[in-house]
Amino acid sequence: MNRILLVLLVFVVGFAACGKSGTDPSVQYNAQKAIDDKLISDYLASHPDLKAKRIDTTGVFYIINPGEEGTGNDLFTNSTQVTVGYTAQILTSGVVIAKTDNFHPSYRISDVIRGWQLGIPLMKKDGKIRLFVPSRYAYGPYAQDSIHLPANSVLDFHIQLYNVIN
């Protein structure tokens, strides 16, 4: 009899643990989306000299200053390889998390964060862009310990496009 009660108890506890735990992921996503969008909007509002444009409805904003457009009409696909120089910082603190200095790495467009996939095709060779990337288009809820990047960080990139290879 004790064995039956024990098995029944384990079954009931196990069944209860299978219930919904935590918050619905879509609720968490929408809450973080609102936080990110407000951070970027507030930052841009506090810097009226920055004339940023929004990329569609993404929440990613960009600035290409006059004279920094670059030249050419490159076609960008997922397999396009770009050589860039960049500085990446956390928008809220200004902490630089990555900087290329004299080293200019090359990436395939399909291998970079979604914010870059949206912003880099707006550039031309030798052009410069500044991207304000909400966490959902960067690393999302995943901290990047190797670069000391907290989860859900909104990022500010300064990117120069040195070369485009299709």
Image: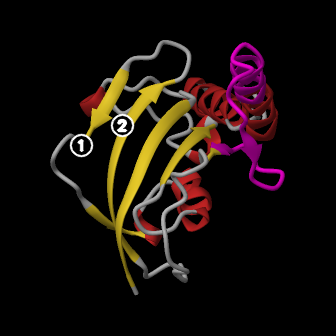
Q: Which mark is residue 137?
A: none
Q: Amino acid at mark 1?
A: Thr
Residues 107 and 13: in front is 107
Q: Could you tell me which quadrant the C terminus lies in?
A: bottom left
- Amino acid type, residue under disc 2 in the picture: Thr
**Observer-nearest of 64 and 139:** 64
Residue range of the region highlighted in magenta in the rendering: 35-62
147 to the left or right of 108: left
Report if the CB atoms under discs 1 and 2 are less than 8 Å apart.
Answer: yes
User: Residue drawn 69% across and 44% down?
Assistant: 60
Name above or below for residue 14 compared with residue 166. Answer: above
Q: Residue at x 73, y 35 (%)?
A: 51
Image-quadrant location for residue 73: bottom right
Check if residue 5 falls in the magenta segment.
Answer: no
Mark 1 and mark 2 lie on one chain; the one further toward the N terminus is 2
* Number of dots carrying numbers: 2
Q: Residue at x 52, y 55 (%)?
A: 116
Neighbor class of circle 2 (other Cα within 10 Å; few <14, some 14-19, many 20+) is: some
Q: Is 47 a magenta residue?
A: yes
Residue drawn at x 80%, y 27% is 34
Q: Classify residue 102 as left or right of residue 55.
A: left
Q: Which mark is residue 100?
A: 1
Q: Position of residue 123 (x, y in %)?
A: 54, 63
The correct choice, above or below, for 151 with respect to 162 in the image is: above
Q: Residues within 10 Å of mark 1 (few under 14, many from 20)?
A: few
Residue that carries the numbered disc 2 in the rendered image: 87
Outermost residue, bottom side:
166
x then y, percent, for residue 105: 24, 58
* Separation (CA) of disc 1 from disc 2: 7 Å
Q: Position of residue 93 (x, y in %)?
A: 48, 12
